[in-house]
Amino acid sequence: MRRNETLLFSETELQIYALIAGNDGIKAREIAGRLGMNKTEVSRWMVSSALMRELCYQDREYCWHALVRQKAPYEGLYEFSGWYGTVGEFLKTDENAWLEELKSGCRRIGRNLNDQRGLIHSFLDCRKTMVCLFEDLKELTDFPFPEWEIAFELRLNVGRMIRIYSDVLVMIPGKVFSLEFKMKKDIDPDEVIQAAKYVPYLEVVFGRNTDICPALVLTGEKEMFTYSKIGKTDYILPVSSGDMLFNVFNEYLGFLA
């Protein structure tokens, strides 16, 4: 599924943001020079654009930075994640240690941990599914997935315009998988919409050269992989049981004959 982020932001905004997010500090005059713009015009965008105000900041040397870099490793993503690291680090961390790190991270980012029993169960259910996914990928592919990056419980909500809530992001070269988990069997049309909701914002954060691959994962079901229409649009979304999640990755990576 691919959405058009220009419906949210102007072409100029996206070009300016891409330069900021792709560099480790850049001044307004350099942005203006690269884009053939007037420095005053760039400065005006930095003040007026919700995209710049919410996802960027200026340091003491007047260089602009993005809260999350648009290239791996995605510097800054940790600050908005309950747990963030490489897949290799995730697989080497035992369940108890991972859970404690996740809970600590959730508290750090302001993630509500009320209803502990149900929520903790969902965390562990999600972890188990992801471990099984990487076991399947190990058998089915020769991908260097331990080098991939993974984030659990991403909460990027620093302003009114940019709000992203993702259960799991798996970041590989050129693609980001955004996985919405539900501990149930039946496909709920509202949850399909929920799984697709943040795609346009993720496209902005990670950049136009990165494909965002959303999916709904129903861990209460078994041996199911299908597609579901997203609301009244013509878009469709992959829906998978936990044990068939490798099919979502195959749809975008094509490793099965």
Image: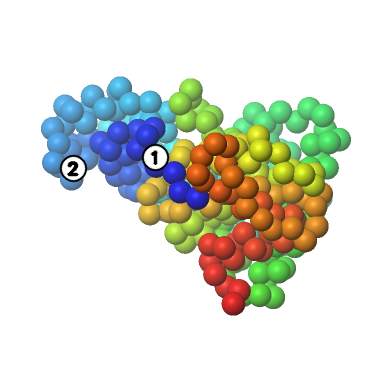
Q: Nearer the viewer, residue 57 or 167?
A: 167
Residue 77, given in percent of the width and then of the height, sits at 52, 44
Q: In the rendered image, is residue 101 in sight?
A: no
Left or right for 212, reference 231: left
- The residue at the point 66 percent across, 56 percent down is 226
Q: Is residue 140 visible?
A: yes
Apparent side of residue 85 relative to residue 240 in the rendered image (left or right): left
Labels 1, 2: front one: 1
* Residue drawn at point x = 82 percent, y = 29 percent: 115
Q: Considering the numbered disc 2 on the image, is that residue within a helix, a strand or a loop? A: helix
Q: Quadrant of residue 122?
A: top right
Q: Position of residue 179 (x, y in %)?
A: 63, 48
Which residue in the protein does label 2 denote? 35
Real-space CA distance between mark 1 and mark 2, rounded to the nearest whole angstrom: 19 Å
Q: Quadrant of residue 156?
A: top right
For disc 2, the neighbor class at 10 Å (few under 14, some 14 to 19, many from 20) is some
> What is the residue that sits farthest to the right in this orientation?
117
| Residue toward you, 124 or 228 | 228
**Helix or strand or loop: what does disc 1 sit on?**
helix
Between discs 1 and 2, the one toward the N terminus:
1
Residue type marked 2: Leu
What residue do we see at 29% from left, 28% from top? 46
Report the amino acid beneath label 1: Glu
Which residue is denoted by mark 1 in the rendering? 5
Question: Residue 119: x percent and y percent?
Answer: 79, 36
- Visual colour scheme: rainbow
